[in-house]
Image (spheres, grey):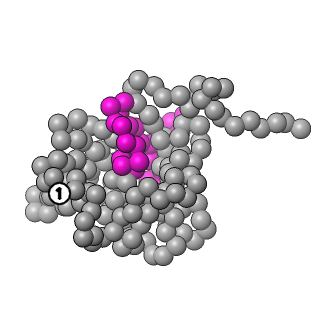
Amino acid sequence: MAKVYPCTPSSSSCCSGSSSGKTYTIWMKSLVANGNGFTVYDSCGRVVYRIDNYSKKSCRQVYLMDLHGNVLFSMFQKNEKPFFEVKNCRKFLKRRETEYHVTMGSDSCSFYKIKGTEGKCEFNITDQQGRVVAEATQKQSSSGVMLGQDVLSLKLEAHVADHSFIMALVAVHGLITRKM
């Protein structure tokens, strides 16, 4: 009988971070049957982050959790004192482009931007200096086959310190675009 061993950074190179950043796979489905949400896998195929929503799609209240179910971020449609706030920036400008500004706490000048194209799954997140911190594209298999629009490849740049915050922004983007 074959033995199965966990993939640990010391025993395998598949999970080690590189100087160019880290890549995750996002499946815009919940691990729970008949649930909404998303699941984030690392390069070894292990679950790293997840959102399980037992209610309806695009719920008003969503929780980003780690593998063990510990809540990392609570996201509400309206909140009195939020850690971050997301606002639509391009209502009347170019219809096909989407742009959302993310302000941090009470600091209205410190923000990120989430930019994409309406109807497409690809988007990117830039910081206040305009540097791309994360880029989501439709996942492609090693043989070149494009997977469904609910499977994304998310590349985080090396200078990104808080991966869970970026995952929270990805979750907000999924809620806004009704992909989750």
* Furthest residue toward left: 92
User: What span is in magenta?
Assistant: 141-167
Is 106 displayed left or right of 177 in the figure?
Answer: left
Instruction: Decide whether residue 147 is among the magenta residues.
Output: yes
Residue drawn 24% across the image and 60% down it: 85
- Residue 159 or residue 95, whichever sits in front: 159
* Furthest residue toward bottom: 55
Whether residue 160 appears in this view of the structure is: yes
Residue 64 position in % (x across, y down): 44, 58
**Vertically, is 20 above or below 127?**
above
**Vertically, is 126 above or below 121?**
above
* Furthest residue toward right: 1
Residue drawn 10% across the image and 63% down it: 92
- Residue 2 or residue 76, whichever sits in front: 76
Residue linked to disc 1: 106
Q: Residues within 10 Å of mark 1 (few under 14, many from 20)?
A: few
Residue 98 position in % (x across, y down): 22, 55
Instruction: Decide whether residue 45 is among the magenta residues.
Output: no
- Residue 141 or residue 177, whichever sits in front: 177
Residue drawn 49% across the image and 44% down it: 25
The quadrant of the rendering that contains the C terminus is bottom left
Give SS at disc 1.
loop
Whether residue 139 appears in this view of the structure is: no
The quadrant of the rendering that contains the N terminus is top right
Figure label count = 1
Q: Residue 130 sits in which quadrant?
A: top left
Residue drawn 84% across the image and 36% down it: 2
Is 46 displayed left or right of 86 in the figure?
Answer: right
Residue 135 position in % (x across, y down): 34, 41
